[in-house]
Amino acid sequence: MVEDEVIAKQLERLLTPAITNQENYYRKLGLRERILNLPLMMAAVLTLLWRDVAGVREMTRMLARDGFLWCNPTKVSQQAVSQRFLTFPSELFEKVFKDLLPSLRTAWHSRNKRPLPESIQFTLSRFDKIWIVDGSTLEALFRKLQSLEEAHYGQLAGKMSTVIDLMTRLPVEIWFASNPKASDTKLEENILNLVTESTLLLLDRGFYHFYFWLQLIDKKVDFITRIKKGAAIKVEQIFTDSYGLRDRKICLA
């Protein structure tokens, strides 16, 4: 399809410089220039997601028959691809993605002609940045690999936390923890090192920690979060009390 070809060309144009930039790091990890190298593995992951490929067996057939994205038709065994997925360093994908982010931000600013929502325009008149912070436990492993078919259902794959720029809707930073039960509060130091003065943070309720809030206030960083269920509050002053908006100054007891 013509539309698929256009998307494939766009992906190649965006990703080729970012992949090339990681070649030195690839060699530092002691990885050989073999068939299943970084460009091919990156194309394989994108193809699995974009094409919703059923598994490695089907993807291996696609690679041998037609190739995909920037990869020419190549014959490799299903076992070799499965093993490569299990051992390929995940930080290489992370580095490519983070290397790509500045280009995505530049592209957003160059093509964005529509006005921002009034609420965002109003907020940006008072803050330099609006960031969203959230953490999510990853779902059970996809059984794309034959070696994972016997894995127990309900197995979690760790926890990912993300800081997103509300204006561009692009990530500012991403953190991953292998422990799916890791508390959001363990990321407080990372957030404090990342944020700067005149930033408005929209925080998930997992960051409900008074000392963390005090540290943000000391850095002149404002934030909005949800109150915990059952929290005791004392209303000190009412600014607005309408059907659509309640604006109050409260004391958390």
Image: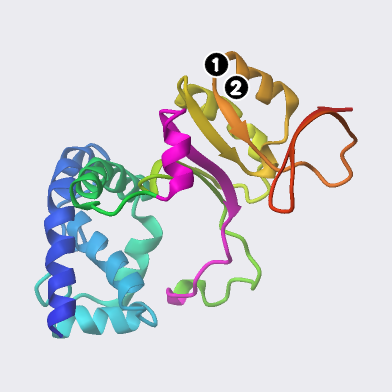
Where residue 234 sits: x, y (%)? 89, 30
Where residue 114 sits: x, y (%)? 28, 54
Marks 1 and 2, how far apart in space? 5 Å
Marks 1 & 2, CB-CB < 8 Å contact: yes
Residues 5 and 120: in front is: 120
> In the picture provided, is 202 more to the left or to the right than 183?
left
Q: Which residue is mark 1?
A: 219
Task: Give the residue displayed 71% in from the left and 43% down from the top.
Answer: 226
Q: Residues within 10 Å of mark 1 (few under 14, many from 20)?
A: some
Q: Quadrant of residue 177?
A: top right
Q: Quadrant of residue 216?
A: top right
Kindly tell me whether residue 125 is visible in this rendering.
yes
Magenta stretch, residue numbers: 117-146
Q: Which residue type does callout 1 highlight?
A: Lys
Q: Which residue is mark 2?
A: 216
Secondary structure under badge 1?
Answer: loop
Q: How many marks?
A: 2
Q: Which residue type does callout 2 highlight?
A: Leu
Task: Give the residue displayed 44% in from the left and 77% down from the top.
Answer: 146
Report the quarter where the N terminus lies. bottom left
Kindly tell me whether residue 75 is visible in this rendering.
no
- Residue 119 is one of the magenta-drawn residues: yes
- Residue 27 is one of the magenta-drawn residues: no
